[in-house]
Image (tube, rainbow, N blue to C red):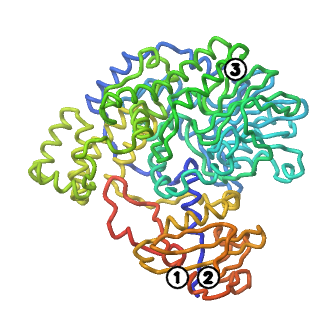
Amino acid sequence: MPSYTLKSFARPLLYASLTLSLTIPGTTANTITKPATRFTGEIYEDTIKRLPFSDNQDFLDAKAGFITALPDGGTVKNGNGEIVYDLSKFKFIMQGSIAPETVNPSLWRQSQLIMLSGFFQLSEKIYQVRAADLSNITFIEGDEGIIIVDPLISEETARYALDLYYAQRGKKPVKAVIYTHSHVDHFGGIRGVVDEADVQNGSVKIYAPEGFMDHAVSENVMAGNAMSRRASYMYGNLLPHSPTGQVGAGLGPTTSSGTVTLIPPTDIIKTNGETHKIDGLTFDFWMAQDSEAPSEFFFYIQEFKALCTAEDATHTMHNTYSLRGAKLRDPLGWSKYINEAIYKYGKDVELLFAPHHWHLTGNDKIIEHLKNQRDLYRYINDQPLRLANHGFRMTEIAEMLSLPDTLQKDWSARGYYGSFNHNVKSTYVRYLGWFNGNPATLHEYPERVAGAKYVEFMGGPQVLLQKAQASFDEGDYRWVAEVLNHLVFADPDNKEAAALQADALEQLGYQAESGPWRNFYLSGAKELRTGVAELPTVDTASPDLIRSMDLDLLFDYAAMRLNATKAGDQQIKLNWIFPDTDQKFAMELQNAALSHIENYQIDGADVTVTMNRSIIDNIMLGQETFDSAIKSGSVMFEGDQSKLTDLLDMLDTFQFWFNIVRPVPLDKANQGASTR
């Protein structure tokens, strides 16, 4: 029997859950860039005129409570001395500096605010470390120790932040941890701040919203490889840190690349108004499910009149759809959760803080911010639907609508992370799907086929290039990018087309106010110019995340990877038995579909496989193989074990570095068994 490993199975699966933690070293090599054109300069000047840059209140708020800077310039290393986070790469974003013409001045302003890093005091008993990762970590002092909120992405950055807190406030025991929601930048550093033994013996409690474990591990697993590849664009991981490259993510500086960990919560919050006494403080929890994350809550600390709204009311327009790829979020529910918080806590609240950006103090200022955030997401829900009900379609709705002037001039409502354009489109798709109702768009050709036809209709490659160059010279970069996409997909090796499209994408990146939009445009330009570079990537298949996956998810993921061509008309019946977890599964391959169900066994199965769940974990982590586990007796078979081999040979491998701005070769659709 061949030597099988599930390492290649686990890795893309975990990328899905840990999209934010993908950081690629070695990306600061010489990169081809060009200056801003006069048309980009005109947009720059128009932005300066339109927005209230003389309003410096955000800078005063973001500096409030500052105590000390991050040690070592914000550089964090792992146990091997390797850098896993380095804020110093953003030193070129100097406070008080004028935005270079290659960066939208509004985004530059936001990046300056985000780079106000260090240790901050929010109130007498609440402190934050900011810009030591993509998110903030919060320390709340109780009667006997501290309560930690959202311990960052990596164990190393979380420990670094805790050490900074101890250096300033003295060493105190950690009494509890709160995960506000199920995204990795809010739980991944947990082992940097607590010992699991203390959680198991009850010394430390961990609070999280209902559904946290399911979504922390499984959110978007089924599209994990594609999502993670797109995330390398969204977070600018392929770009140098420079005025022509990455200038931050709009939500925070960038992501760390250390050790992602997870300790399951001990206390699950399920209902609105659920109150818990934590280290002498009264926490009132308020559910915000399916808003910015599928599992999320707010909380209010009665003694401090302090409200944490998780990631639903930060200092940016957030994503109701993430460009990396994700299930669509609900802007209507999002708006209603903020409104509920206003009416429930609004008369008393004096401090508002979040796991991103800076805190606010004073009731009037807090309520104004919350109401604008509430209205922002309500507008994103209601106005696209209004126009859709008039018969307008997704793309034109996004062009027809703009935010009210009052919200446009609220810096915290601007699209530094999400964008109004793509959020409007996500509302349309959430309610009406991808089809716009026009039958002409019901069965369109794929890009690689349509591209060739468009090029022919336009008079051939040279005519198209001449016209595209004329459009570029006129500053119509959106059209250049769109029209040359046809030629690039028709002829991926056409260097002249790729070069001109890259130039257009680059200018669109320089113009973009959204950090992710900028990163997508510039990453696309880089790939068109230099191709796909298969760079080193962080191994996100961490033991904590693998062991937290349930077997149902594991089998679902395997079924998604089944290659229908290889499966053909084969039929296989398997039973799985896992003695250590007391679980049994029946699995059937039929009609090129792989189905399973728990708590059943098939009479007359081709093979029954008996193994402990812990062996699956070891195989997924690369600590052993199926072959070695079989030889050691850890995996036992009853029946024809070749049937399992046959099934494993039908599972596709996903290559991470697939093309994005050029077509993926068609032969990739039927390549490779993942398990060999």
Kindly state the secondary structure of the residue where label 1 is placed: helix
Q: Are marks 3 and 1 in contact (CB under 8 Å)?
A: no
Residue 593: where, in percent of width, then height? 48, 70
What residue would you read off at disc 2? 605
Residue 43 in sight: yes
Name the residue tied to disc 1: 646
Would residue 31 be found to the left or right of residue 326 on screen?
left
The residue drawn where x is 84% and y is 49% is 199
N-term mark: 3 or 2: 3
Nearest to the observer: residue 627 or residue 85? 627
Query: Which element carries disc 3, helix, strand or loop?
Result: helix
Seen at 52% across and 30% down, the residue is: 332
Asked if disc 3 and disc 2 are in contact, CB closer than 8 Å, the reply is no
Q: What quarter of the picture does the N terminus occupy? A: bottom right
Residue at mark 2 to residue at mark 1: CA–CA distance: 15 Å
Q: Residue at x 82, y 33 (%)?
A: 276
Closest to the camera, between mark 3 and mark 2, is 2
Q: Nearer the viewer, mark 2 or mark 1?
A: 2
Q: Quick one: which residue is furthest to the top in this view?
A: 364
Task: Report the amino acid beneath label 3.
Answer: Lys
At label 2, which amino acid type do we have?
Ala
Q: Residue furthest front?
A: 603
Place of residue 632 in the rendered image (x, y in percent of width and height, measured from the top left):
73, 85
Q: Position of residue 286 (x, y in %)?
A: 70, 31
Q: Tag 3: Cα neighbours inside 10 Å, few (<14), some, or many (≥20)?
A: some
- What amino acid is found at the position of numbered circle 1 in the picture? Asp
On the image, the x and y values in percent for residue 498 come to: 25, 51
Going from N to C along the chain, the mark reached first, 3 or 1, is: 3
Q: Is any atom of residue 103 visible in this view? A: no
Q: Which mark is residue 344?
A: 3
Q: Residue at x 14, y 38 (%)?
A: 470
